[in-house]
Image (cartoon, rainbow, N blue to C red):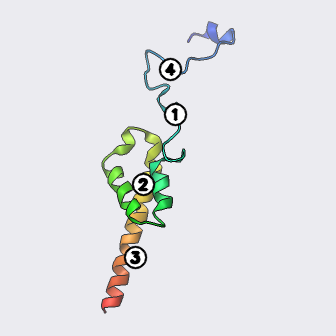
Amino acid sequence: MDTDDQRKGEDAPISDSENPLLGKFDKPLPCFGCGIGWFSLLLGFVCPLMWYYATILYFGNYYHKDPRERAGLAASAIAALLFTIAVMVTVIVIIL
């Protein structure tokens, strides 16, 4: 889009033939718009296996499909790590 078009008040196109990624992230995220990572984090408080599922997606580079998923998947991976440590400490305390 040149400056002449901008001066005329024309809108910029959503997708561009030169840059196909321009309109890629206009769609809402899956799982009620919050993304798989954040949805797994919230659902993980009910079923902690969801944190491990999101961790597998995170280390499997799922966020390359949509970079907006990276933060939620990382948060779920951290929650899975903390949950694992808490379970291990609990088991050690019960055994000893």
**Mark nearer the viewer, 2 or 1:** 1
Q: Position of residue 73 (x, y in %)?
A: 42, 52
Q: Position of residue 74 (x, y in %)?
A: 42, 54
Badge 2 density bin: few <14, some 14–19, many ≥20, Cα 10 Å: many
Disc 1 target residue = 27
Q: Are marks 2 and 3 in contact (CB under 8 Å)?
A: no
**Mark nearer the viewer, 3 or 1:** 1
Q: Quadrant of the C terminus?
A: bottom left
Badge 4 density bin: few <14, some 14–19, many ≥20, Cα 10 Å: few
Disc 3 target residue = 86
Dividing the picture into quarters, in which one does residue 1 lie?
top right
Badge 1 density bin: few <14, some 14–19, many ≥20, Cα 10 Å: few
Q: Earlier in the sequence, mark 2 or mark 3?
A: 2
Q: State the separation of the CA atoms marked 4 and 2.
A: 30 Å
Q: Earlier in the sequence, mark 4 or mark 3?
A: 4
The amino acid type, in three-letter code, at marker 1 is: Lys
The amino acid type, in three-letter code, at marker 3 is: Ala
Q: Earlier in the sequence, mark 2 or mark 1?
A: 1
Q: Earlier in the sequence, mark 3 or mark 1?
A: 1
Disc 2 target residue = 74
